[in-house]
Image (tube, rainbow, N blue to C red):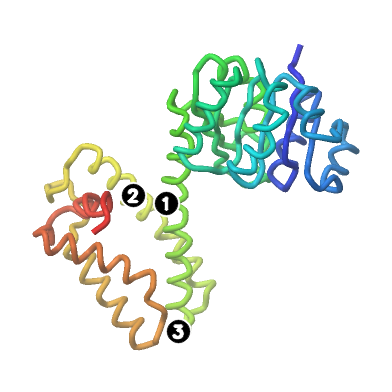
Amino acid sequence: MKPAITVLGTGRMGAALAHALLKAGYSTTVWNRTIEKTAALAAAGATVAASVLDAVEASEIIVVNVTDYPATAALLRGDVASALRGKLVVELTSGTPNGAREAGEWSTEYGVTYLDGAIMATPDFIGTEHGTILVSGPRQPFEQSKEMLQALGGNVQHVGDDLGLANALDSALLALMWGSLFGALQSIAVCRAESIDLGELARQWTATAPVVEGLVTDLIKRTEAGRLAADDETLSSISPHYSAFRHLVELMDVRKIDRTVVDGYDAIFRRGIAAGHLHDDFAALSQFMEKAG
């Protein structure tokens, strides 16, 4: 038989998780501080618990998706803790690696099995084959609950026994995403300053995106291998990048575009060049990102 599941937190993401479990045939109990947010789930067949204690007592597996780890601690570490003994908590709240490790230590002390996860998707991807969820923690409970986890996202991956790994990967991947999004904001500002239609920007980005993806993939591989010096396979060294970058900065200064983002890029470029890496592969800049200057 499928285990009973409780979902604590029914905001947009939590509600998507609960709906996916219901669709997959799991007996699902939900709790939310604002009970009005559980109405649609109740209509879909979920049981609405009157309290966190009631919600925890109703199920074998507790899925948590609230604001942050302190919010989870406030819900589970009081009078509720004894009711969690022998159960599995799957934390899908966004947090830090050290926060996940501390939660794991607390769980062990109280006889709770604990998995920590990072949802690499927006709510519309939950319950689909493309929904990605990274999970870290002991392998056995992951395997035992894998069917349930796959109901939440078809691309569920166990990334390691260290409970902090899912959140660490989450931050790393978000850094890539935000780099793209802030880069897009920067390019939009340049286009507007130069009266370039944003539809044209979109068309050219579609054509350019595969090149950028190839550069990122090559950067990761070269950094992993320690191949930081330029060689016959170098796609681009720091020198031409910095030359083009200076053109961007000049344009921005002329058009009085905010330089907050590019000043950060400039600082990294300058540190790498000052250390003698002007003609090395762009990957050489990786060593100047690993520690604050």
Say above or below: 150 vs 111. Answer: below
Q: Image check: 116 left or right of 173?
A: right
In this view, which residue lies farthest toward the left? Answer: 276
Question: Distance from label 3 to label 2 (Cα)?
Answer: 28 Å
Q: Residue 238 in the image: state x and y as whole percent.
A: 19, 60
Residue 105: percent from the left, percent from the top?
50, 26
Q: Mark 3: give few (<14), some (14-19) or many (20+) Cα within 10 Å.
A: some
Residue type pointed to by label 3: Ala
Q: Nearer the viewer, residue 49 or 188?
A: 49
- The secondary structure type at the circle numbered 1 is helix
The amino acid type of the residue labelled 2 equals: Val
Residue placed most toward the observer, 108 or 210: 108
Q: Is residue 275 above or below residue 156?
A: below
Identify the residue position indicated by label 2 in the image.
216
Q: Quadrant of the N terminus?
A: top right
Closer to the observer: label 1 or label 3?
1
Q: Of the two numbered discs 2 and 1 on the same chain, state the one appearing first in sequence.
A: 1
- Could you say which disc has been placed on residue 176 in the image? 1
Crowding around mark 1 (Cα neighbors within 10 Å: few <14, some 14 to 19, many 20+) is few
Percent from the top left, x then y, of residue 225? 21, 37
Residue 162 vertical position relative to residue 94 in the rendered view, above or below: above
Identify the residue shown where x is 88% and y is 31%: 45
Q: Quick check: marks 2 and 1 in contact, CB under 8 Å?
A: yes
Q: Element under label 2?
A: helix
Q: Earlier in the sequence, mark 3 or mark 2?
A: 3
Foreground disc of the pair 2, 1 = 1
Residue position marked by numbered label 3 in the rendering: 193
Q: Is residue 261 left or right of residue 188?
A: left
**Gap between marks 1 and 3, in whole Å?**
26 Å
